[in-house]
Amino acid sequence: MTITAFQALACPLDGDPLQRDGASWRCAAGHSFDIARQGYTHLLPVQNKRSRDPGDSKEMVAARQRFLNAGLYQPIAEAVSHAALADLPARASVSCLDAGCGEGYYLRELASAAREGQTLALLGLDISKWAVLSAAKQDNRTCWVVGSNANLPVQPGTLDRLLCMFGFPVYHEFARVLKPGGLLLQVDAGPDHLRELREIIYPTLKPERTGEAQVPEGFTPLATETVRYVLKLTGAEQIADLLTMTPHLYRASAEGRARAAALSELTVTVDVRLTRFARQTG
Ligand SMILES: C[S@@+](CC[C@H](N)C(=O)[O-])C[C@H]1O[C@@H](n2cnc3c(N)ncnc32)[C@H](O)[C@@H]1O
Ligand SMILES: [Zn+2]
């Protein structure tokens, strides 16, 4: 397996292709974006920032990094890597974006799942600079950028695969950047996801929102897969990390969070949907 440089970045101001020029990326119109010392590039124009420090906080990123690097969502990573790399010719060259990549776990796992002879060009994008910084520190083979799913700094029709893991899909952008026949792989919480944790932190359980029903314009649905298993969390830190990396941290009341903080072990169900869509041709 070879990881090659990602070549299809576009200027976030005008969409022109970006060319590497030493320690920066430049477009033909002269816009220039420095590559930070830690190896990532900021491609989110100030006017597209809705807040001063958008996306996940430093604490949320650190919690997710500990949790994921402990291998607790490894079956999810395996399913996604398998779906991304299945049915490829032996010497395939694949370009893949993780849109809302967090601290980069799923791209690291994809890189290690690729087979001999396969070549990957990887782009990880997140609106949180903390997430991208953490991703860049852990892996220097992938192109890491701060950017938004709402305005992807990617040239049209250039991607073979696009991952959206527990994220915020913007389908018209995903359709724009995928090649015809390219795959969108989306992972979302299923109805029983983390049910036991939710039972502890909420007075009554609302059904999990499941985003399965609609097929986005420009895509053809392929088979959906469920990844379901039981996860035993040991120690207060793992439980706190799981709460901190999910939206439940903000939705739960102070009493609910205190009940979770009092636990020293917890068994939770992991129940996620892996939805696959193919970008239509023509
Ligand atoms: C629930 S986390 C999932 C992170 C990662 N995909 C994972 O599963 O480990 C959602 C991520 O989306 C990012 N995010 C939020 N809004 C975004 C946007 N408009 N564009 C790109 N990323 C965004 C957050 O900063 C956060 O890292
Ligand atoms: Zn430009």
Image (spheres, helix red, strand yellow):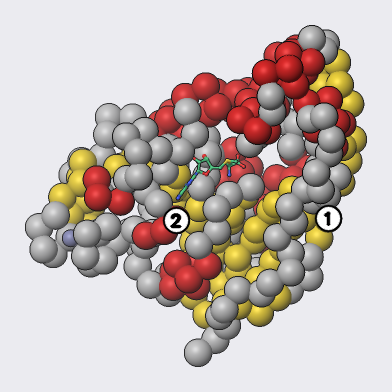
Does residue 110 appear in this view?
A: no
User: Crowding near pointer 2: few (<14 within 10 Å), some, many (20+)?
Assistant: many
Q: Is residue 159 left or right of residue 5?
A: right
- Mark 1 or 2: the one toward you: 2
Q: Which mark is residue 226?
A: 1
Cα–Cα gap, marks 1 and 2: 25 Å
The residue at label 2 has a CB less than 8 Å from ligand 1 = yes
Q: Is residue 15 left or right of residue 173?
A: left
Q: Nearer the viewer, residue 23 or 244?
A: 244
The quarter of the picture where residue 130 lies is top left
Q: Secondary structure at mark 1?
A: strand
Which amino acid lies under the numbered mark 2 shown in the image of this protein? Asn
Q: Which mark is residue 149?
A: 2
Residue 20 lies, with reference to residue 95, above or below; the image says: above
The quarter of the picture where residue 244 lies is top right
Task: Residue 171: give x, y in percent of width and height.
Answer: 53, 67
